[in-house]
Image: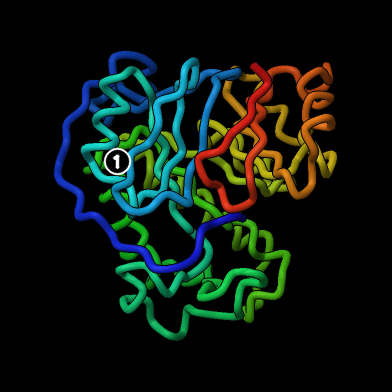
Amino acid sequence: MVRTSGGRRRVAPVALVLALAAGCVGCAGGAPQRWSPEAGANWQIVLAAEPAAGVELLDGVAVYDLDGADTSPEQVAALSEAGARTICYVNAGAWEDWRDDAGEFPAEVIGAAYPGWDGERFLDIRRLDLLAPLMEARLDACAAAGFDAVDPDNIDSYDTETGFDLTRADAVTYALWWASAAHERGLAVGQKNAPDLVGDLVDSFDFAVTEDCAADGWCADLSPYLDTGRPVFAIEYTDRTGSGDFAEFCDDPALSGFSLILKHRDLDDWRAGCE
């Protein structure tokens, strides 16, 4: 539920064909290959970088979660050539006025302001008839840029004031649409937060991404992913968790297997891990 704000310039993707040497899932019958991430992978997430800015390759870090609109195909290819995997961040549940496609969203799907994030408003996730073509275009751009996976944010907006009468069932339907659409394009897909939806989503998603789950005490709700060898990429934030508390999380047997990192709330390139 954390994005960057301010002006953004979409870098037009070009078609790239990357050989995914390992982790084929759903390959039978000519289906697109996709990455099958493994539990325990070290990772980094950077969403505050300027468009087309370089991404630092960190020693021992094999997975990078980056903004799909601000990361060029050349950057994705460079990370892939270095042996890293890349996840394409997309805001699935909220409209952002700085995105290049902001004007394509019908007014009827744009709802209440997202608290704390200027220029961002909730989307009516029930309206797949209107949202699907827009989100498919974003997924196509992720795939064309060479990303291995997608991180659809804000799939759990039904439990807040969105301006729409959203239900838990609406959130499940929307999330499962994302899983299917991502897989059709050969992309792995992550469940973002929404611990109460795990039972409905775990069989369709390839990994999970959490925010403040250790600080708030709900990491265990995502354990079904770890139980089946899939990673939980867990972000803790410095405005909630100090370095001492983070070290305790790293040493906590209950959090063994979680891919824990400590980040600034704006998701710049600073990172601390449990290594």
Compared with 157, 197 (above or below) is above
Is residue 9 rendered to the left or right of residue 14?
right
The residue nearer to you, when weighing 161 against 166, is: 161
The residue nearer to you, when weighing 31 against 110, is: 110
Q: Position of residue 237 (x, y in %)?
A: 70, 44
The residue nearer to you, when weighing 160 against 166, is: 160
**Quarter of image, res 23:** top left
The residue nearer to you, when weighing 68 against 204, is: 68
Q: Position of residue 189 (x, y in %)?
A: 46, 39
Is residue 18 rendered to the left or right of residue 114?
left
Name the residue beneath numbered marker 1: 185
Q: Position of residue 195 (x, y in %)?
A: 72, 44
**Residue drawn at 30 percent across, 21 percent down:** 28
Q: Amino acid at mark 1?
A: Arg
Compared with 157, 267 (above or below) is above
**Residue drawn at 72 percent across, 44 percent down:** 238
**Quarter of image, res 263:** top right
Q: Position of residue 204 (x, y in %)?
A: 52, 37
Compared with 104, 193 (above or below) is above
**Residue drawn at 60 percent across, 78 percent down:** 113
- Packing grade of label 1 (10 A; few <14, some 14-19, many >=20) is many
Quarter of the image with the C terminus is top right
